[in-house]
Amino acid sequence: MTKLASLIILLGFSAIALYGAAPTNTWTKHIIQLPALGQINSAVANDWDRDGHMDVLSSFGGKVVCFKGPDWKVVTTLHTFDAKDSRTKPNAACIHSCLMDVDGDGDQDFCGSNNTVFWLECPEDPFSGKAWTYRTVDDEILGTHCLITGDVNRDGHLDLIANSGRPKKLTKFHDSLTWLEIPAKPHQAKAWTRHVFAEKDAPGGSHYTGFGDVNRDGRPDIACAAKGGKGFPNGEWFAWWEQPEDPTALWKKHVLAANEVGASNITPGDFNADGKMDYLATRGHGKGVLMFRGPDFEPVEIDPDIV
């Protein structure tokens, strides 16, 4: 196999595929997981055993598994979901996941959202066949569709950013956004320190978040998108929250656009290279890609029809 110049993990409801950039500038598809029972919503890549080959970690069929590179034929079960894991019954697969060195030991641990937000500790020998230790991050927020990392309070340590998108009847943290701080002793803690920065002002089907200092005040801000429709009242918006001097306080909400059917993704960056921060956004549950051009975040349609 040609050494991968880059790695993209494409996920559907049935399979995991890798695409590698070959010298001819064509992309070669490698299916590493054939159709499986249930959804496959997320996967992450890292060289966990440090052998120079990328491994792929994902969850489906009630398990978290790792495909060992370079051929991804050796599959190790890292964790089997169990109702005893938390107060909320787990689904068969994580809706989202990311990597983070939670305990500061130099390797990448796995953070996932499966009704409960949790982390799996990467052991010294990640492919020994023994399960990775499961620990709870937060099992009171619900509907966490997105997990991303960022140093929210600028203390030199990464935090987790997670939404809580379930209705009031299911969680007291409904329609909210949080950032979760690693406790001083993550191996002993029953939960991480929760900071609700958007309290009940992120309604609808909140989806993916974006992290970055868009107003250039030295403090990173957080954006989010939410779909609406049946079961997700007051959604269909793009917005960002401005971080105050005290990151543990409530943040100021700025609505970028409303009535955005299928709003799902938003990411900050200087996309037109004019020295000002913009937002790139998609209506993943509808159609269209657009940009909010800084500094006033004027909406600019890039492709209104792409689905």
Image (tube, rainbow, N blue to C red):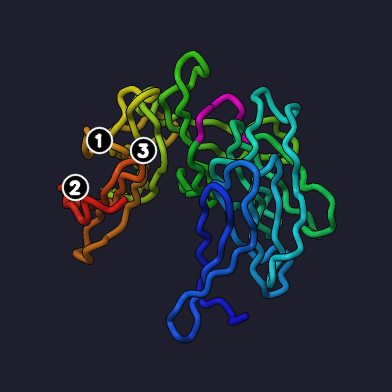
Residue 306 vertical placement versus 199 (above, below):
below
Residue at the disc numbered 2: 297
Residues at marks 1 and 3 touching, judged by CB atoms closer than 8 Å: no
Asked whether the beta carbons under mark 2 and mark 1 sit within 8 Å of each other, the answer is yes
- Residue type for callout 3: Glu
Region rendered in magenta: 137-144
Residue drawn 19% across the image and 64% down it = 274
Can you see residue 65?
Answer: yes
Q: Earlier in the sequence, mark 1 or mark 3?
A: 3
User: What residue lies at 33% left-to-right and 27% top-to-bottom?
Assistant: 229
* Percent position of residue 147, x then y: 51, 43
> In the rendered view, does 110 fall on the left or right side of 284?
right
Instruction: Specify the amino acid type for callout 2.
Output: Phe
Q: Residues within 10 Å of mark 2 (few under 14, many from 20)?
A: some
Going from the N terminus, do you reach mark 2 or mark 1 first?
Answer: 1
- Give the residue drawn at x 50%, y 30%: 143
- Viewer-side residue, 164 vs 184: 164
As drawn, the label of residue 254 is 1
Whether residue 216 can be seen here: no
Q: Which picture quadrant has residue 246?
A: top left
Q: Is residue 138 left or right of residue 195?
A: right
- Real-space CA distance between mark 3 and mark 2, rounded to the nearest whole angstrom: 23 Å
- Residue 245 is tagged as 3
Where in the figure is residue 192, as x and y percent of width and height? 61, 34
The image shows residue 293 at horizontal and vertical percentages of 19, 53
**For residue 141: magenta?**
yes
